[in-house]
Structure formats: structure tokens, C-alpha cells
Image: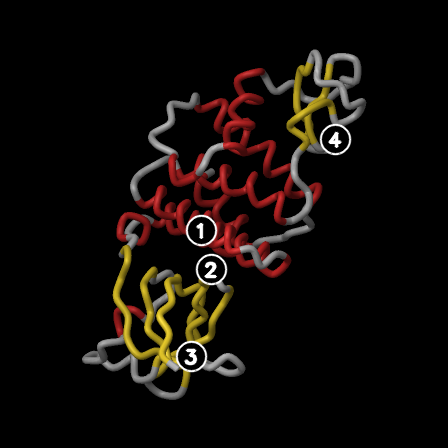
């Protein structure tokens, strides 16, 4: 049957001489489709059969096997990202991360947050900020959310002085030992990252040191609690450092 799907091509694999197999990430999950003849220069499927193509696709849907791509039209060419190596590195990492999370949690919210994030990056918003906002939200879908309500050690919500990735959240003055002190601006902004609706994010004025503090914290937290090893993150770090 014919089916219209909104999604983004996460991966492409050569198939036969002039075709490809595409994995399209959608709110319903990943749908595998065959794009027949798309490598031909005159094929109408050529422009929509490439990795990171965000489009509405019309497919001959086959629930148990590969579906077949009939046609499609771009929803956003993401040209700002695709013409910038650094931004493309962010997109590669974000995409790989989302795919790993989606394997553990099939919520359509993950797809919508992912699309909203890459749109914001394509619009010119700070890619590190947008990446970190998505990262902190995805932790809940991995079952390892940060404790942003009270001290992770004693449960008190008074005299919070820092946040620690090893402890898993806030640390109060009574429980503080040798943990790095993240100042109040960093802690408040980290909480804002968690609470904000990605689609509503506009040009945020955030000090560079706060951005770096949050990124360093989240990197340590992911290493400590998620068990995810992503090559694209290593490549991104080499690109931006």
C-alpha cells in the first residue's frame, strides 16, 4: 500500500548497480526502503536518496520486508549544515546518539526532538548548546536522568553548591568533599537546558565558560552512566578542539 512518511535518511547502502537501500528514521521508527535506479543522473529519486535528506517520502509500504520508494519532496535541505564540516560533524554525532537511544526507547518524542535540534542548528543557533540540550533530554529515555531537584547524596534541596557527574546530580554544602565546583549560573543554565522546549529555543545569550562547563559535565556524565561509545563523538571533539 502507498504510505506517506516524514523522516530523515540515516544511512544509505549501495544496492545492485544503480540503486540504494535507505534507512529512514521517522516518528514510527526506522523504515528500510529500496530506492530503485536513484544513482542514474536523470532519476527523480536522485536528490532525495542521500544521507541526511529530510523529506516527506511516498513509499510502497511493506511491513515485513523492505519498502520501495516511489517519490518524495524535501522539507528542508539543511544546506547550512551540509556546507560546513564542523556542523556536519555535529549532525553525525547527534544522529548516531539518537539512533543508539532509539534502540532502547521507541518513543516518537525522540524523533521530534532530534528534528527540532538539527533545524535549530541549521538556522544558525550555537551547535554545542543545541547538542547539549538534546543530550540532557535524552538521558531520561536511557533511564539515567540527572537529579536536578535535590542533593544526590542526602536528598536535601538546601545549600546546593555544585553538581557532580559521578554523584549523578546536585551536591549540597554538607555533602561536598572534593567535587569540582560548578557555579550557580552553570547549574541554572543546565536546568534550563533540561526544561526548555527545543522548538521554542531562540538565540540564547550564554557565556562561553558556562557553555563549556555544561558540555564538560555532560560528557563526563555520559561516560559515567550510559556506557555509549560513539566514534562520531571522538571525531567531533577532534574537529572542534
Which residue is at the far left? 42
Image quadrant assignment for residue 181:
top right
Q: Work out which quarter of the rendered image holds the N terminus and state it.
A: bottom left
- Report the side of 139 relative to 205 (left or right): right
Residue tagged 2: 27
> How much space separates mark 3 and mark 2, taking CA atoms?
15 Å
In the image, residue 92 above or below residue 199:
below
- Report the side of 43 relative to 234 (left or right): left
Query: Contact (CB < 8 A) between labels 3 and 2?
Result: no
Q: Closer to the camera: disc 3 or disc 4?
A: 3
Rendered image: mark on residue 167: 4
Q: Position of residue 166 (x, y in %)?
A: 73, 33
- Report the side of 175 relative to 36 (left or right): right
Query: Contact (CB < 8 A) between labels 2 and 1?
Result: yes
Marks 4 and 2, the one that precedes in the sequence: 2
Q: Closer to the camera: disc 4 or disc 2?
A: 2
Marks 2 and 1, the one that precedes in the sequence: 2
Rendered image: mark on residue 61: 3
> How much space separates mark 4 and mark 2, taking CA atoms?
34 Å
Marks 3 and 2, the one that precedes in the sequence: 2
Rendered image: mark on residue 112: 1
Q: Nearer the viewer, residue 37 or 56?
A: 56
Q: Label 3: state its secondary structure.
A: loop
Q: How is the image coloured?
A: secondary structure
> How much space separates mark 3 and mark 4, taking CA atoms?
47 Å
Query: Contact (CB < 8 A) between labels 4 and 2?
Result: no
Identity of the residue drawn at 46% across and 47% down: 113
Estimate how packed mark 4 is, as few (under 14), some (14 to 19) or many (20 or more) residues with alpha carbons within 10 Å: some
Amino acid at each position: 500500500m502507498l504510505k506517506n512518511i516524514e523522516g530523515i535518511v540515516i544511512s544509505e547502502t549501495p544496492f545492485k548497480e544503480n540503486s540504494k537501500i535507505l534507512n529512514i528514521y521517522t516518528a514510527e521508527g526506522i523504515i528500510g526502503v529500496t530506492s530503485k535506479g536513484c544513482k542514474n543522473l536523470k532519476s527523480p529519486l536522485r536528490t532525495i536518496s542521500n544521507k541526511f535528506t529530510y523529506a516527506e517520502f511516498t513509499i510502497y509500504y511493506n511491513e515485513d520486508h523492505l519498502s520501495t520508494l516511489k517519490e518524495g519532496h524535501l522539507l528542508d535541505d539543511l544546506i547550512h549544515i551540509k556546507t560546513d564540516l564542523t556542523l556536519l560533524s555535529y549532525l553525525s554525532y547527534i544522529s548516531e546518539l539518537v539512533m543508539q537511544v532509539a534502540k532502547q526507547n521507541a518513543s516518537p518524542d525522540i524523533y521530534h526532538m532530534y528534528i527540532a535540534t538539527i533545524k535549530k542548528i541549521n538556522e544558525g543557533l550555537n551547535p554545542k548548546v543545541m547538542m547539549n540540550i538534546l543530550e540532557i533530554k535524552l538521558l531520561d529515555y536511557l533511564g539515567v536522568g540527572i537529579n536536578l531537584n535535590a542533593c544526590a547524596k542526602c536528598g536535601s534541596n538546601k545549600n546546593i553548591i555544585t553538581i557532580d557527574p559521578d554523584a549523578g546530580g546536585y551536591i549540597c554544602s554538607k555533602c561536598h568533599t572534593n567535587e569540582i565546583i560548578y557555579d550557580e549560573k552553570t547549574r541554572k543554565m543546565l536546568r534550563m537546558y533540561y526544561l526548555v522546549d527545543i522548538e521554542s529555543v531562540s538565540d540564547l545569550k550564554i557565556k562561553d565558560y558556562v557553555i563549556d562547563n555544561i558540555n564538560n559535565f555532560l560528557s563526563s556524565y555520559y561516560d559515567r552512566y550510559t556506557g555509549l561509545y560513539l566514534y562520531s563523538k571522538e571525531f567531533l571533539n577532534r574537529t572542534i578542539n
